[in-house]
């Protein structure tokens, strides 16, 4: 059901009712680091939808976001800040934030994290297999990513991949980074220009502008940097 659920959340749900302490349960200001809590579950990340509601709020709680956890004394809003940003940044811009949030969440099956990310990034999904190897699952999800995401991984993720290909990070590499920084302005290939194509062997081809930089030292100890752009094909 995962491909269907992903489409429902992404395209057809105007808002989501989120239960912090479990579906249908009353809100409690505790257990925010528990692996079963909404804040810690891999699958609940798909409920990051702008203008959503918090369910299970009992009388006497005027604003649950201002509640302090009884065990950690942390304000709920502080834990929801990242979710709020994800809700405002959709698509490619939200990807680094999704990874940062998913990295600290828990799941019954490790592959759930891979598919959880894919559900929020891919227009369609492969069939869910709970015993699928993580790197294989990530490679499969790469095949389903829109082209803009491929460009983002090529041009904005600077460490070379340590898996079968160097142009993108492996899943283990993606989960081991302490914090994936905001990529900033990403290179977005248009529908008919600067195409990026995923090849059968897992590599990619890119056809578009290539920036060449030349540093020339001067007598003052400073230097000049010259940039030229050509339109060549690169693999």
Image (spheres, rainbow, N blue to C red):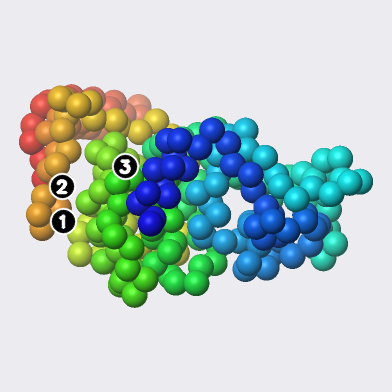
**Quadrant occupied by the C terminus:** top left
Q: Is residue 28 left or right of residue 208?
A: right
Using the image, determine if residue 139 lies above or below residue 196: below
Residues at discs 2 and 1 in contact (Cβ within 8 Å): yes
Which circle marks residue 123 in the picture?
3
Residue 216, can we see it? no
Q: Identify the residue at image location x=84%, y=49%.
A: 58
Judged by depth in the image, the label closer to the viewer, 3 or 1, is 3
Mark 1: secondary structure: loop
Mark found first going from the N terminus, 3 or 2: 3
In this view of the protein, which residue sits in the foreground, 98 or 208?
98
Q: Is residue 21 visible?
A: yes
The residue located at (27%, 56%) in the rendering is 126
* CB within 8 Å, label 3 to label 2: no
* The N terminus, quarter of image: bottom left
Q: Which residue is mark 1?
A: 202
Q: Residues within 10 Å of mark 3 (few under 14, many from 20)?
A: some
58 or 202, which lies in front? 58
- Numbered label attached to residue 198: 2
Q: CA distance from mark 3 to mark 1?
A: 19 Å
């Amino acid at each position: 059901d995962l491909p269907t659920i992903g489409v429902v959340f992404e395209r057809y749900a105007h808002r989501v009712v989120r239960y912090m302490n479990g579906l249908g349960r009353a809100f409690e200001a505790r257990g925010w680091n528990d692996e079963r809590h909404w804040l810690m579950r891999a699958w609940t990340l798909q409920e990051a939808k702008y203008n959503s509601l918090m369910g299970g709020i009992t009388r006497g709680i005027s604003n649950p976001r201002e509640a302090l956890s009884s065990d950690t004394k942390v304000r709920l809003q502080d834990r929801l800040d990242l979710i709020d940003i994800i809700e405002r940044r959709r698509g490619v811009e939200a990807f680094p934030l999704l990874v940062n949030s998913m990295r600290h969440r828990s799941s019954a099956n490790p592959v759930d994290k891979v598919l959880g990310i894919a559900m929020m990034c891919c227009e369609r999904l492969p069939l869910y297999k709970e015993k699928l190897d993580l790197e294989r699952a990530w490679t499969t999800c790469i095949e389903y990513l829109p082209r803009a995401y491929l460009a983002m991984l090529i041009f904005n993720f600077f460490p070379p991949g340590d898996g079968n290909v160097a142009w993108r990070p492996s899943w283990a590499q993606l989960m081991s980074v302490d914090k994936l920084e905001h990529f900033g302005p990403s290179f977005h290939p248009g529908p008919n220009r600067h195409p990026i194509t995923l090849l059968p062997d897992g590599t990619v081809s890119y056809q578009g502008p290539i920036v060449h930089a030349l540093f020339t030292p001067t007598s003052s100890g400073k230097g000049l940097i010259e940039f030229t752009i050509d339109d060549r094909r690169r693999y």
